[in-house]
Amino acid sequence: MAESTRAVAVSRRPYRRHEPGEVFGRVTLVARLPKVNGNGYWLCVCECGRELRAQIGQLTSGRTVSCGKKACNPAFKAVPTYLGAHGRIWRERGPARNRACVDCGKRAAEWSYDGTDPEELVEPEGPRAGLPYSLDASRYQPRCRSCHRRFDHTRRRNNIRPACGPCNFGSTRAVGRWEDEESA
């Protein structure tokens, strides 16, 4: 007896029809667009009001959740991170190496947060987790590396805000431009 060779039907997921008004992340479906190279697209509008064209598979998988602008991107952080804040300080005030250290007077190497901002932020995660920082450029002082380390260590050990005293940490004396010894 010969064995029959019948095709076996493969069960497919039921086709889901999407309707205008469905929301995927921050994107709302508006209207179906003509297919391009066999791919179906939808005209969508983001919460910010910007229109975009997206494939339904990108929307249902979560790969497209907004129009792509920074303000609409859920991964965008409205508050700068520790490194972002330090980059802002560098752009606003220039490199610390052009200044004298506020503690010892030697050439500064880094901008050091003085710990006096009442709106202090703390890095929540990553290698710098737990480090305090500020978005206010006036809360940073130029320090050489050794004074910066000593200043931060003293603050952590004593769990206090910096204060002027015999060690001169937290001093508010005027900071001048660094001058080479040859030009002095």
Image (cartoon, helix red, strand yellow):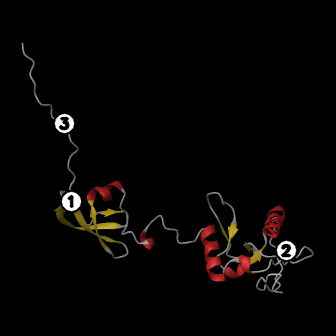
Amino acid type of the residue tagged 2 in the rendering: Phe
Label 3 SS: loop
Q: Nearer the viewer, mark 2 or mark 3?
A: 2
Quarter assignment of residue 31: bottom left
Answer yes or no: is residue 175 visible. yes
CA separation, marks 1 and 3?
A: 24 Å
Label 2 SS: loop
Give the mark, 1 or 3, whose residue is nearer the N terminus.
Answer: 3
Amino acid type of the residue tagged 3 in the rendering: Val
Determine the residue positioned at 66% across, 82% down.
93
Q: Which mark is residue 10?
A: 3
Give the mark, 2 or 3, whose residue is nearer the N terminus.
Answer: 3
Quarter assignment of residue 8: top left
Determine the residue positioned at 6% across, 12% down.
1
CA separation, marks 2 and 3?
A: 75 Å
Q: Which mark is residue 40?
A: 1
Image x and y of residue 49, in percent = 34, 76
Mark 2 nearby-residue class (10 Å; few <14, some 14–19, many ≥20): many
Answer yes or no: is residue 140 visible. no
Answer left or right for 158 relative to 93: right
Quarter assignment of residue 73: bottom left
> Is residue 169 positioned above or below 173 on the image?
above
Q: Which mark is residue 169?
A: 2
